[in-house]
Amino acid sequence: MSDKLDPRAAALLKLLIERHVHDGQPVGSRTLARAFQVELSPATIRNVMADLEDLGFVASPHTSAGRVPTQAGYRYFVDSLLAPEPLAAAEQARIANELLPGNKSSADMLHTVSGLLSRLSSMAGVVTVPRRNVTVLRRIEFLNLSGGRVLAILVVNQREVQNRVLDMGRDYSSQELERYANIINETFAGRDLLSLRRSLAEELSEAQTRVNQMLGEAAKLADAALRNQEADDYVIAGGTNLLGFQELADVGRLRRLFDVLDQKRELLELFDQCLGASGVQIFIGDESGYQVLDGCSLVTAPYTIDGQVAGVLGVIGPTRMAYQRIIPLVSEAARLLGTGLGSGLGSGLESR
């Protein structure tokens, strides 16, 4: 495969991809001849298209004399021909207005940014929850409820408050719960949740052999309160937008794709690969390593909180996407989400 196309072939490939992205149809030589800035005969263009087809950059569907880009064609386009468009001022303002002001919890911000990515791309928007090693416990309180249940109130990061109802299987007095909360706050406040969960597991294990099990009982309550934080997860919006793309309309393919979006494990593995990226990453077709994403592209970018990579967000859609728009959209959303999550504005309530 050629490392670099000559200028005429590159210009025609770029034009073909832009037309196909816009119309969703195979692009014929006459269409290219009319749209090309330099006058070329349809025969000359057909010869160039034949060369591009030999290189694997375009293909001819059986039902049409026109051509469509291949995965290799899209990759060459993204790597060598693409000029990302600056994000429209209105879109930039919309993202900033919805992510930065107000007193939203981190959960609200994640749902907001995934919804924005979906609406602004007309595809699926996805964002992983912040990693536990950048989520810090500031304080915990316990309130007794009826039926052996306890309400745990956690303050994490700056001022974000999360509520969890714990089914502990026995009743606790208010005095007990106050003592246990004091122990946890004195022992573990200021720790990130990842190391905190490990320490709690050690305390629970060691407490089995201690005469004084006060810390063990406190650790048991705290562990129950933090348990839902242990599972990696992500928020997705606009999955049904994928139904509107003809190339993804096969029922079997859609069922497998939605299974992956629902089960999450495979996508989480892919997102983990993106955590070390310095900027936008683009997976086209089978480059993701997951067969179910063949025919799809995933554009991702990591977001940071206080200088640490906390998670990944992105857009999932067909390979026929307007990369020049999606790339700056994802990049700006990642920047503003990180700013919003790190600003300490989160103060909403979250129940699990």
Image: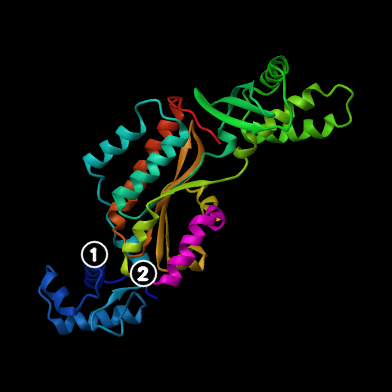
Residue 274 visible in the shown view: yes
Rendered-image quadrant of the C terminus: top right
- Mark 1 surroundings: few (<14), some (14-19) or many (≥20) residues within 10 A: many
What residue span does the magenta drawing correspond to? 250-268
Is 16 contained in the magenta span? no
The amino acid on which the numbered mark 1 sits, given as a three-letter code, is Glu
The amino acid on which the numbered mark 2 sits, given as a three-letter code, is Ala
Choose between 350 and 83: the one closer to the eye.
350
- Residue 242 at what x, y percent from top left? 36, 60
Residue 74: image quadrant is bottom left
Residue shown at 29% from the left, 81% from the top: 51
User: Please, what secondary structure does the residue beneath circle 2 have?
Assistant: loop
Q: Mark 2 = which residue?
A: 249
Residue 243: image tag: none
- Residue 316 at what x, y percent from top left? 40, 56
Residue shown at 34% from the left, 55% from the top: 123
- Residue 224 at what x, y percent from top left? 68, 34
Choose between 95 and 281: the one closer to the eye.
95
Residue 278 visible in the shown view: no
Is 257 contained in the magenta span? yes
Residue 90: image quadrant is top left
Residue 18: image tag: 1
Choose between 44 and 230: the one closer to the eye.
230
Residue shown at 30% from the left, 78% from the top: 52
The residues bearing labels 1 and 2 have C-alpha atoms spaced at a distance of: 21 Å
Mark 1 and mark 2 in contact? Answer it, CB < 8 Å: no
